[in-house]
Image: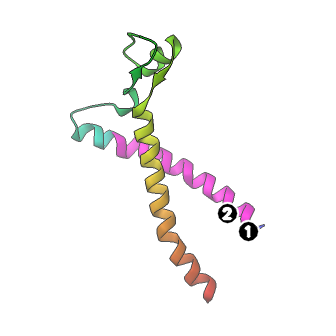
């Protein structure tokens, strides 16, 4: 039962972190780097001439490294929060 609750809370927390990164952190990072939109960074692998990632994916294979940067940042934030939570959980279990 405890594991099920942990999985549900973890999934909900992951969505919060996704929103934090997509809606708060990445716009600030974009502003700092001159208004760049990381989500549209890609390398066309099928010779596409599209300007957005969505259009390029429709035309063929792409290497979407901008999305990878965003997902990696999500992971780093989640890992850091879990790293901080483990000692707190261990301390509360001892008492």
Q: Is residue 20 left or right of residue 37?
A: right
Q: Is residue 8 left or right of residue 13?
A: right
Q: Is residue 78 magenta?
A: no
Q: Residues within 10 Å of mark 2 (few under 14, many from 20)?
A: few
Q: Position of residue 6 (x, y in %)?
A: 67, 63
Residue 64 in sight = yes
- Which residue extends farthest bottom? 95
Mark 2 vs 1: CB contact within 8 A? yes
Q: Position of residue 8 (x, y in %)?
A: 68, 56
Q: Is residue 27 left or right of residue 62?
A: left
User: Which residue does the image show at 42% across and 48% down from the upper left?
Assistant: 73
Which residue is disc 1 drawn over?
Answer: 2
Q: Quadrant of the C terminus?
A: bottom right
Instruction: Check disc 1 and report its element: helix, strand or loop.
Output: helix
User: Which residue does the image show at 40% across and 31% down from the upper left?
Assistant: 39
**2 and 23: which is toward the camera:** 2
Q: Quadrant of the N terminus?
A: bottom right
Most frequent secondary structure within the magenta stretch = helix
- When the figure is inspected, residue 8 is found, relative to residue 59, above or below; the finding is below
Q: Residues within 10 Å of mark 1 (few under 14, many from 20)?
A: few
User: Start and end of the magenta stretch?
Assistant: 2-26
- Residue 6: mark in rendering: 2
Instruction: Tell me the CA gap for discs 2 and 1.
Output: 6 Å
- Which residue extends farthest right? 1
């Amino acid at each position: 039962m405890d594991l099920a609750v942990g999985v549900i809370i973890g999934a909900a927390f992951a969505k919060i972190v996704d929103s934090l990164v997509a809606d708060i952190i990445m716009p600030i990072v974009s502003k700092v780097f001159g208004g760049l939109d990381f989500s549209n960074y890609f390398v066309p692998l099928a010779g596409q001439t599209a300007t957005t990632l969505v259009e390029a994916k429709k035309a063929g294979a792409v290497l979407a490294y901008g999305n990878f940067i965003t997902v990696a940042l999500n992971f780093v934030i989640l890992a850091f929060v879990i790293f901080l939570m483990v000692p707190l959980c261990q301390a509360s279990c001892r008492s």
